[in-house]
């Protein structure tokens, strides 16, 4: 049974409070900056970010020269939609430790929030430079580059992320997505196949592989991938609608009609998405 429903499993805050109850009276109030951060983290894990802010501020007051505490406080401000205060904390962290990757990454996230892609690229690039073996930083840099229209370098950054974490389906998926946008269908199919290999239980990866096969004209391969997606998520109506189109194109009218019945009446959101997909699958 999920721990959400198991009231015998203590939360992070309850564990911290239990430890405090077992302490002497003098020790019960978190006395060190680390204790303040620990309690702040526990509160964040419970979704109590406003309360966590109080303890992150205390951690910073106790050790104002610790860049990690400034970054953590900045992240809590960012989560609370206090971007100006978040940026100030990130800049304080950078001033203390200029080569620390985390505040650069977090500052880039703020810039992305407001569509400032060039500023975000500058900070993501520093984060990737200072923590060169972090594939997620490479992905985020690539995504920002893509939004800024710098497609070639965006591809390069995703390729580097895969070199660092070749087993991670997430990066294969996004590289496939980039390749597909550029019309490099062969490369896109290879990367999406890798995504399905490393995450075989993700129906969306199989579905997207099916779409690529349809666009490339490999209808039987598309049907196999789409059937796999439906096995994993049989109630997804959009999957049934797309495979119905593929079966119809193959001349399998009976199977096409069966999947159309499974698809039923799509809601307006799914109908709009389906039309976008169908337009994207138009082949020369």
Image (tube, helix red, strand yellow):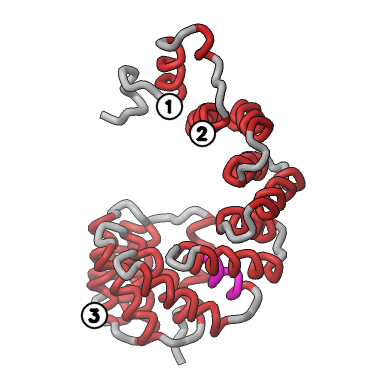
Closer to us: 135 or 188: 135
Q: Position of residue 81 (x, y in %)?
A: 69, 42
Please give the residue where the numbered disc 3 appears in the rendered image. Answer: 220
Q: Position of residue 152 (x, y in %)?
A: 54, 85
Which SS does the magenta portion mostly show? helix
**Within 10 angstroms of label 3, few (less than 14), some, or many (20 or more) residues?**
some
Q: Position of residue 48 (x, y in %)?
A: 56, 28
Q: Is residue 212 magenta?
A: no
Viewer-nearest of discs 3 and 1? 1
Please give the residue where the numbered disc 1 appears in the rendered image. Answer: 12
Viewer-nearest of discs 2 and 3? 2
Mark toward the start of the polypeptide (2 vs 3): 2
- Give left or right: position of 62 versus 160: right
Corner quadrant of residue 153: bottom right
Residue at (71%, 52%) from the top-left corner? 91
Q: How far is mark 2 from mark 3, CA to CA? A: 50 Å
The mark tally for this picture is 3
């Amino acid at each position: 049974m999920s721990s959400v429903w198991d009231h015998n499993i203590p939360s992070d805050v309850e564990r911290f409070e239990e430890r405090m109850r077992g302490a002497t009276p003098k020790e019960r109030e978190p006395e060190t900056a680390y204790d303040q951060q620990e309690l702040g983290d526990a509160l964040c894990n419970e979704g109590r970010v406003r309360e966590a802010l109080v303890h992150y501020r205390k951690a910073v007051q106790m050790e104002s020269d610790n860049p990690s505490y400034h970054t953590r406080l900045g992240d809590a401000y960012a989560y609370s939609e206090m971007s100006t205060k978040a940026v100030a904390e990130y800049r304080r962290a950078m001033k203390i430790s200029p080569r620390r990757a985390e505040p650069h990454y977090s500052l880039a996230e703020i810039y992305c929030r407001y569509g400032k892609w060039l500023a975000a690229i500058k900070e993501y690039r520093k984060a990737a430079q200072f923590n060169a073996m972090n594939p997620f930083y490479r992905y985020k840099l690539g995504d920002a580059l893509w939004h800024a229209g710098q497609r070639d370098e965006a591809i390069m950054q995703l390729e580097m992320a895969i070199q660092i974490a070749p087993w991670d389906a997430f990066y294969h998926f996004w590289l496939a997505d980039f390749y597909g946008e550029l019309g490099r269908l062969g490369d896109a199919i290879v990367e999406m196949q890798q995504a399905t290999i490393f995450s075989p239980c993700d129906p969306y990866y199989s579905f997207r592989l099916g779409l690529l096969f349809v666009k490339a004209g490999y209808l039987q391969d598309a049907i196999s991938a789409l059937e796999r997606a439906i096995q994993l998520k049989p109630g997804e109506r959009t999957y049934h609608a797309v495979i119905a189109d593929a079966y119809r194109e193959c001349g399998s009218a009976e199977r096409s009609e069966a999947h159309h019945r499974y698809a039923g009446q799509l809601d307006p959101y799914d109908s709009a998405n389906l039309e976008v997909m169908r337009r994207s699958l138009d082949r020369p």
